[in-house]
Amino acid sequence: MANTLLSIQVIPKTPNNEDSIPYVDTAIEVIQKSGVKHQVNPLETTMEGELSELLDIVRQMHEALVASGSPSVISQIKIAHNPGGISMDKLTEKYRP
């Protein structure tokens, strides 16, 4: 069982003040390619896995955004870590029909 949930919102600066959504899409592609369980939400994406793995994905996201032309990136991150195990499904099951 995973021991960490990490929610991230990337705020990439764009070179010419163009739309940032293509950059956000690039960041989400990094998550998708990683294979970790994740959920894309309107304002952030939540990943489920091991802490070190998720932090490495954050690093890869930043590197991909810079490689795509973003001169700088700010990320807002929330981490829930429980060595005994934690999951998105368990935390949200009471809200599903």
Image (tube, rainbow, N blue to C red):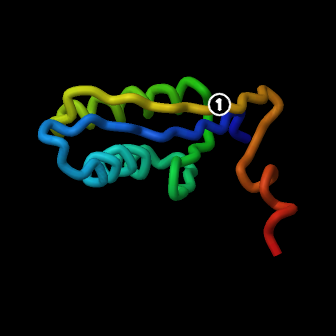
Q: Nearer the viewer, residue 11 or 91?
A: 11
In the image, taking residue 10 as reference, residue 41 lies left or right, namely right
- Where is residue 82? Give x, y as percent: 78, 29
**In what quadrant of the picture does the N terminus appear?**
top right
Q: Nearer the viewer, residue 4 or 14?
A: 14
Question: As shown in the figure, which amino acid type bears the numbered disc 1?
Answer: Ile
- 39 versus 1 height, above or below: below
In the image, taking residue 96 as reference, residue 8 lies left or right, namely left
Q: Residue furthest left?
A: 16
In the image, taking residue 68 as reference, residue 64 lies left or right, namely right
- Where is residue 74? Give x, y as percent: 39, 29
Q: Residue furthest front?
A: 17
Query: Within the image, what quadrant is residue 66 found in?
Result: top left
Residue at position x 50%, y 26% in the image = 55
Circle 1 sits on which residue?
79
In the image, taking residue 18 as reference, residue 44 lies left or right, namely right
- Where is residue 29? Give x, y as percent: 35, 50
Residue at position x 24%, y 52% in the image = 19
**In what quadrant of the picture does the C terminus appear?**
bottom right
Q: Residue furthest bottom?
A: 97
Q: Residues within 10 Å of mark 1 (few under 14, many from 20)?
A: some
Residue at position x 38%, y 38% in the image = 11
- Where is residue 12? Give x, y as percent: 31, 37
Query: Within the image, what quadrant is residue 94 found in?
Result: bottom right
Q: Nearer the viewer, residue 38 or 25?
A: 25
